[in-house]
């Protein structure tokens, strides 16, 4: 098992497979690097080097009670990238991982990043406030906090329905996908998951998006019930200097899993462009 001890002593689990141009995958809340199975296997077969880590407190990484904020997450990625001496990297983030990607690229990525991809990402900001009147009300995140703290086992099952669009009429529900989501979530730390809710909902990535020069692909499902497209992906694309938006009618938040064939094809085209 590959682990890296960070400067603050936290042990981070990571996968590093293959050779070629490196693609670094950043997972969403409250999951792990396993959520990228469909992408890592595909791109490994395409001749790329694929890397993914379990964010601190998530998956198989150390369950430290500290550092569950976007600045620390981005700094952790910078340490991994430096240790592995990765260059010409394409950073690909889903949901919370999209926020982690754009904060890393903006603050630490100079000279090492080729491109970035934000999939169903929480950028530029999720929560409703004075500057984001159409955002998600704080009460929604308070409810997520309450359920994570008190009912995590059942909540992590229930959440798979809107996450994958399984609550839509005619949906092809996969119990295996649901169980795998639950497995990943329950493998992580309740403290890390609780604190990360604030990080993914309240962090403002507006200036990060504006400052990034490398090409950035924004991919977002128009039926995303977790991170609404109209107030995140649609706006994030307009803030980028060199951004491209692909929106997908009917696709859910968890589209890298349920719609892997389409997502992988569009990712490959962007990486090669």
Image (tube, rainbow, N blue to C red):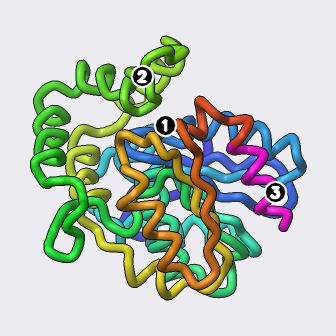
Q: In the image, 237: left or right of 267?
A: left
Q: For this rendering, which residue is in front, 266 or 78?
A: 266
Q: In the image, 262: left or right of 184?
A: right
Disc 1 is placed on an element classified as loop
The reply to whether the C-beta atoms of the residues labelled 2 and 1 are less than 8 Å apart is yes
The percent position of residue 113, horizontal first and vertical second, equals 67, 76
Q: Residues within 10 Å of mark 3 (few under 14, many from 20)?
A: few
Q: Main secondary structure of the magenta part?
A: helix
The percent position of residue 72, horizontal first and vertical second, equals 36, 69
> Which region of the structure is painted magenta?
263-273
At 81% from the left and 57% from the top, the residue drawn is 269
Alpha carbons under labels 2 and 3: distance apart: 30 Å
Above or below, 8 relative to 58: below
At 58% from the left and 62% from the top, the residue drawn is 218
The reply to whether the C-beta atoms of the residues labelled 2 and 3 are less than 8 Å apart is no
Alpha carbons under labels 1 and 3: distance apart: 21 Å
Q: What residue is pinned by disc 3?
A: 269
- Which quadrant is the N terminus positioned in? top right
Q: What residue is pinned by disc 1?
A: 252
At 38% from the left and 69% from the top, the residue drawn is 124
Q: Residues within 10 Å of mark 2 (few under 14, many from 20)?
A: some
- Which quadrant is the C terminus positioned in? bottom right
């Amino acid at each position: 098992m590959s682990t890296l001890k960070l400067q603050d002593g936290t042990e981070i689990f990571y996968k590093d497979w293959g050779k070629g141009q490196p693609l670094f995958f950043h997972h969403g809340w409250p999951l792990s690097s396993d959520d990228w199975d469909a992408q890592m296997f595909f791109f490994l077969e395409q001749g790329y080097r694929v890397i993914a880590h379990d964010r601190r407190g998530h998956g198989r990484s150390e369950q430290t009670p500290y550092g569950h904020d976007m600045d620390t997450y981005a700094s952790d990625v910078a340490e991994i990238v430096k240790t592995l001496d990765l260059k010409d990297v394409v950073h690909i983030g889903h949901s919370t991982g999209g926020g982690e990607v754009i904060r890393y690229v903006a603050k630490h990525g100079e000279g090492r990043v080729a491109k970035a991809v934000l999939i169903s990402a929480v950028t530029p900001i999720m929560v409703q406030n004075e500057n984001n009147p159409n955002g998600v009300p704080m009460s929604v995140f308070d409810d997520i906090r309450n359920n994570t703290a008190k009912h995590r086992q059942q909540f992590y099952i229930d959440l798979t329905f809107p996450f994958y669009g399984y609550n839509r009429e005619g949906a092809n529900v996969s119990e295996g996908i649901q169980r795998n989501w639950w497995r990943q979530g329950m493998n992580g730390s309740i403290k890390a998951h609780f604190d990360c809710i604030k990080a993914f909902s309240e962090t403002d990535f507006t200036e990060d998006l504006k400052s990034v020069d490398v090409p950035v692909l924004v991919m977002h499902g128009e039926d995303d019930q977790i991170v609404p497209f109209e107030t995140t992906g649609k706006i994030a694309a307009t803030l980028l200097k060199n951004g491209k938006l692909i929106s997908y009618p009917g696709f859910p938040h968890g589209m890298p899993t349920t719609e892997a064939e389409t997502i992988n094809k569009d990712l490959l085209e962007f990486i090669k462009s």
